Amino acid sequence: MTEQTVQLEAALKIHLLLVDDDLEFKGVMQRHLERIGIRHSVSVCCLDALDLLEAQNAEVVIMDMNMPEMDGIQCLRKVKERWPLSEVVILTGHASVKSGIEGMESGAFDYCLKPIDIRELIEKIELAAQKALINQEDALLIPATPAVVPQAKRTS
Amino acid sequence: MPLLDRILTLLRRLRLPGATVPLLNSEPAHRLLVAHSRSFRDLLVAFACARKAMAELEAAWEDGRPLSMSFIRARCTQVTVNVFKVIRHQGQIADRRDSELERAFSRLRQRIEAILEGERQPVAGEMLLDLAQINRTLTSLTGEKMASLAEAGAITNIRIPPGFVLTAAATDLFFQRNQLYRKINHILQQTEVDELSDLYSKSASIQELIQTAPMAPELETLLLDRFDRLTGAGPACRVAVRSSAIGEEFDRSFFTGLYHTELDVGRDRLIDACKTVLASKYTPQAISYRLAKGLLHERCAMGIGVLAMVEAAVSGICHTCSIDGPGDTLDLFYAPGMAKGIVESTRSVGHLRLSRLPPHRIVRRQEAEDATRPWLTDVEAIALAEAGMRLEHHFGAPREIEWSIDRTGSLFVLQSRPAAVPRASVAPSPPVVAGQPLLHGGVTGCDGAGYGEVFVVRTMQEALHCPRRAVLVVRHPLPSLAPLLHRAVALVAETGNQACHLAAQAREFGLPCLMAMERATELLAAGTPVTVDATGRAVYQGRVEPLLRPTVDRPDPMAGSPVQRTLASALALISPLTLLDPCPADFRTVHCQTLHDIMRLCHGQAVRRMFEFSLRSGQGKAAKRLRSTLPGQWWAIDLDEAPGDDDHRPDIELTDIASPLPHALWGGMQHVSGQKPAFSRRQTAAAALIRAGVRRGFDLIRAPFSREKNYFLISQKYCNLSIQLDRQPVMVEAMFDDQRGAGSITFRAAGSPRQTWRLELLAQLLDHFGYRINRVGGALFAWMDQESDVELFDRLKTLGYLAIRIRGLDAERADAGGLWLCRDKIICEIKEMLHHD
């Protein structure tokens, strides 16, 4: 199984939430997500997005930074605080080193600039989906310490 | 104690203080390896993304092409965010955060941030100023145009209309209160400026944003009160609302005809007219002008002049130093009514040339074709020449003056600014050309010659499809066509004159330009290849080489521009690689001077860590020995399949590896054995490879446990091979992005102090095969980005060949002549190898 297939399979297993008030972009993205078969819901503002997440968990959230009502970073922090296993990909039309690092430090999976090639974004979604599923697997595992074999025991 | 364990213990003590290095012989430990493999792949992806953005910045710098601040900001952000990710993934692989590295990164990114955001201070000062209060010391508040006009009004016998200026302090406040800079940057980042339709559409969005933004009530009241006092509050009173650009680069950028002037504005339209003029800062022509000049829109503030309308009988432009005539003459262009049609070339224009020295003598008069009588009398012309020369004398340099004579015969100066582009002291002589031109005549807007295919523009819809490097042929040289100048090689217009705005812009950018070429849109068929000889005022079919030899120095509009300076400053903190040689002495955080250094350090540390983990995970799983006819031990560490690999065979064939990257590299290495003379008399290829396996300090990190083995780190899209040359580490690394159909290769070699000739030869060969080379101290670093898959595999094969081939050369061949012979011979061998395949 190739790496791409694994990623795509992961994307098909998850539910995605798209948060963006740019109707044109939202429309294009929805068409692509439907074509690929990624289950998704959409929201045009952060508060609505948080309500939607309460109703249905989303493993991957694609979120525009410049939204009305709530600062994107603030929204990202709320999502990561409440749903730490979800992965958030930030989109922004206003590139800024400061907001990029703030976003990453706040737990974003990736920080992407608009305009973005849809294929590139789909690839990011697939990677984020893979990561989100790994997060879930890891959370299910009983925390295990790697077996560090004492030197004395090995050599004895 | 087994040798390996002793070495690991030593490593823990000496090389990795504080790091926990578990012995990976259990399932949880294997999961750790899986997690580290994943982090390593994520690190490589982030590394590749950062390198891609970095390469785009470097290419933009090297090309010197026009680029926007949005481009720089976006790429710098991509680099920084991805370096952050590289550090994070490296920390995951190392099982600890490197706070010293994080601090070094933080310092660098804060400096980059400061460079990108700049130190923009709000414009401070009065919101409104009467023209009578203004002189040139207030240029930064009122703009060049209004400051000069006000100062002109103070000169004896020079008359200007009454008026006032809404200063840059007020317009800046309007932008700040409405958060317009942020919103505009948001739109500009998403604008494909090379796509004209997108440029026009986004320009419209920005202008609408400005026109619909509310003006502060106190500012509106101030404006209207001042308007009432200016005009005496009569309902029929009208004003002209004019832009007055402010720019730190005004000495080299003239903004000719870029911004709107609103005429005949009454009280009811005053506020809207001011916003329209402000919005004209973002017309397609203004955006593309700033792009071509490397100017920042936030730094190009604007004042707005509100001047009482002059009921003009005749208006025109005066160039106090003739544009294309003898140096001791001046030019007057004129037409009845307002001057707008003259600068836009939508109407016929009269032209007078007078001597600059008094008494001003008319040396040439050319009336417009539709003039039934002279539109300007000799007396009026001489009065204009006197006024023009007084202004030039006052300001100390040639001027471009807009004027009107009202119905009572009074002369008003409406605008006075430095002449956009001074004439060359000696006009270049056109070379003699045989053959009949397709067209000849007209006037020279800008000297020079250009070759390209004709592209006729009759409508703005057609303009949107203008290709690059076209000869642009238009009816009227309208200012709205200005964005096309930056993609054309020459301009031919049916109307126009030297005074029109498009001609002035053509001169500013050195674009050959012919005006008043009658029937050009009919006679020059679209797609015809032509040579435009603007200096000789003719258009020839096909390419006329003698004309195209440069006789005029073309200006470089980007040179030294604010955008270029910003790019240079940011790039200095991002791109240079000083950590070339991964020898322990220098390969430390403290020596990281750039983001590239940090990436390099993290990558080097991660590769070292992955080797360690892979070795300790049990060789039957992640690391497998390659069965091969080549001597020495060759091991493949699979970064992709390690997690779920059920194959417990201890060794595999190369054909079991799915990734094409090691195949290409290996192919080149194996090919060497077919080249008998490639090795010295004392060595064979096999012997060389065995030596590679047993020499001390074998791998790039000099990890003692890998002394006897050669390792490939492999994933579907990545391959890393470390071998040895002259007891020094050599590393080849390739990445391939099949989504983009492109990949990159990096090659690093540390040089032996005794055999620098070998590295010199390698550098020459890699240079020949198109690699970019950097040498610092004794290390060689070569790389290529964005190669297609076929090129990538060929170049990898070349590298594999070189890595083994170079090793076999004799030291006695190291004299200069011998080096050249070797170089040429190896080039032939490689070409033959690639051709054969």
Image (spheres, coloured by chain):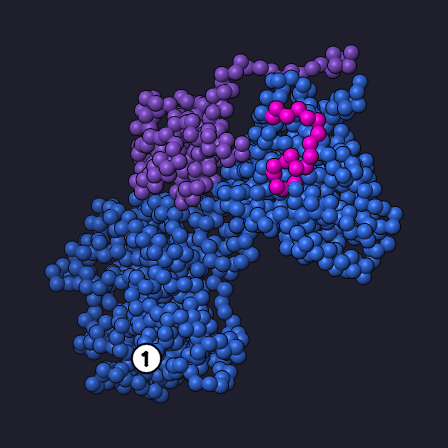
Chain bearing tag 1 is: B
**Residue B768 falls inside the magenta stretch:** no
What's under tag 1, amino acid-wise? Glu
Left or right relative to B429: residue B607: right
At a point 41% along the width and 38% down the height, the residue shown is A91
Q: Is residue B610 above or below residue B421?
A: above
Q: Is residue B559 above or below residue A138?
A: below
Left or right relative to B347: residue B632: right
Where disc 1 sits, the SS reads loop
Q: What percent of the width, then of the height, locates residue B584? A: 72, 36
Colour chain A is painted in: purple
Q: Which residue is mark 1?
A: B518
Q: Is residue B349 above or below residue B87?
A: below
Q: Is residue B218 visible?
A: yes
Q: Nearer the viewer, residue B781 or A137?
A: A137
Q: What percent of the width, then of the height, locates residue B625? A: 71, 31
Q: Quadrant of residue B533?
A: bottom left
Q: If the image is split into quadrants, where does the N terminus of chain B sit?
A: top right
Q: What percent of the width, then of the height, locates residue B238? A: 17, 63
Left or right relative to B5: residue B609: left
Binning the other alpha carbons within 10 Å of mark 1 as few (below 14), some (14 to 19) or many (20 upward) gives some
Which chain wears blue?
B
At a point 49% along the width and 28% down the height, the residue shown is A131
Stretch of the chain drawn in magenta: B645-662
Q: Quadrant of residue B25?
A: top right
At a point 30% along the width and 85% down the height, the residue shown is B366
Q: What percent of the width, then of the height, locates residue B360? A: 35, 85
At a point 77% along the width and 40% down the height, the residue shown is B630
Q: Nearer the viewer, residue B822 or A47?
A: B822
Q: Is residue B490 visible?
A: no
The outermost residue toward the right is B682
